[in-house]
Amino acid sequence: MFQTISPVDGRVYVERETVTESEINAILALARQAQAEWRALPLAERARLCSQMVDAFVAQKDGIAEEITWQMGRPIRYSPLEVLRFEERARHMIRIADKALADVQVEPLAGFTRFIRRDPVGVVLVLAPWNYPYLTAVNSIVPALLAGNTVVLKHSHQTPLCAERIAQASVAAGFPKGVFQYVHATHEGIASMIGHQDVDFVAFTGSVSGGHAVQQAASARFIGTGLELGGKDPAYVRADVNLAHAVENLVDGSFFNSGQSCCGIERIYVDSAIFDAFVEGFVDLTNQYILGDPTQPETTLGPMVTTRAATFVREQIAQAVNAGARALIDEKRFDRSQPGTPYLAPQVLVDVDHTMSMMVEESFGPVVGIMKVANEAEAIRLMNDSPYGLTASVWTTDEDAALRLGQQIETGTVFMNRCDYLDPALAWTGVKDTGRGCTLSALGYEQLTRPKSFHLRTVV
């Protein structure tokens, strides 16, 4: 049995039982059995059923949005966006499936028929986190199903209702039994599933330590793992920037979802010529946030997911200040921000450097450090001085400069004048400790399929 404690008011919001070993065996056996029938369906039929699942999911958007707020604390004014983005990504992957999963043709050779087919890997185990509970899951679930795999979803104990909502939508869509299932499981149960002969691929989104645990559990088997792990995403603001646009978007990129985003902005490097003006605008806009009850429509900043998470960020801020950083936001402006609670005011730090943990270690909270840089070379060096590499953004009116700098940044996605966003047409991937593998885009199908070559010789 586990409990989901709502960060909104500290009450128990959900109680569920975890699966037993025998239940795991039965769930995976059913997934294996169902996969043979599911992969035999024409792609058009799988796409039709997936579309109906999306329809059924979106039809429940109001209830889903309210549950997101209560489970993890995102303000209700923003929670419905997750349903819309879920639909956007799912529809895109459905739309491109024909081309992405088509046979790969090779040059003609007289007397032979040759091509490469994309076979499903089999049973896909999706391990999803709480911070964007539907958006992280949909990246793997829908393409896995379209490719002919069956899926078992295990969601964070903080957001268990999300797994149940997707399952309800799959039933409403008319999915064959066993094609999509979910489990509520312990860490030991997850390790058991990863090591189980009926799991063929694991898609994990979470912490670096969690990624290592997945790898360890899979180490005795030759199965694939897709790992989207930590981030410490940087931004570089050039002197030629549209200042108002950069301020508005980087404040949002830093503090949306209380900073609890793998691709949120956690460190900003600003050209010295505009540093003071940028910081002034950034602080002014940050002070306009309303920290409060996320179930109220006026709230723009909700609690962090747990008191423990908020305490970690508070400690990072304190360590930085003790080392010489200056905190520019007066926490007293935000009445709800109190130690010992998940409610934490946004914070902006200057006079920071890379000896401070909050500039190199993932914060995953509403805090950002802003550093002055003298030139592009210094900015690139600092942006790359990180164990992570998910996204990075360059803020400039010069696209050629953005392309040139982007080539030098060690990251999975380079943005220009944008941040904290996933475009489903582009590969979502990372480097270094951010993990490995790729979701979304046509390339997102590659880890969910295996190549099978056909070499047919005509003999008369």
Image (tube, helix red, strand yellow):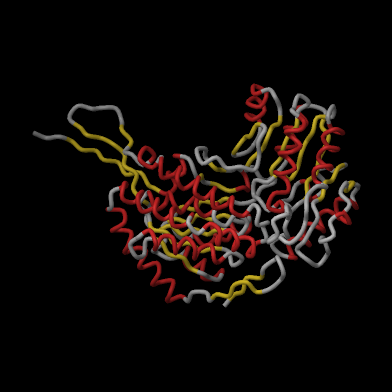
Whether residue 325 sits left or right of residue 135 in the image: it is right
Placement of 9 over or under 377, stated as above or below: below
Placement of 149 over or under 236, stated as above or below: below
Which of the two residues, 447 or 149, is positioned nearer the viewer here? 149
Instruction: Name the residue: 37% across, 49% down.
Output: 147
Residue 101, percent across and down?
A: 36, 42
Which of the two residues, 272 or 96, is positioned nearer the viewer here? 96
Instruction: Name the residue: 39% across, 39% down.
Output: 100
Residue 423, percent across and down?
A: 55, 40
Residue 437, percent across and down?
A: 51, 46
Whether residue 292 sits left or right of residue 415 in the image: it is right
> Which quadrant would residue 432 be assigned to in this image?
top right
Placement of 309 over or under 274, stated as above or below: below
Whether residue 453 sits left or right of residue 397 in the image: it is left
> Which quadrant would residue 308 be assigned to in this image?
bottom right
Image quadrant in which the C terminus is located = top left
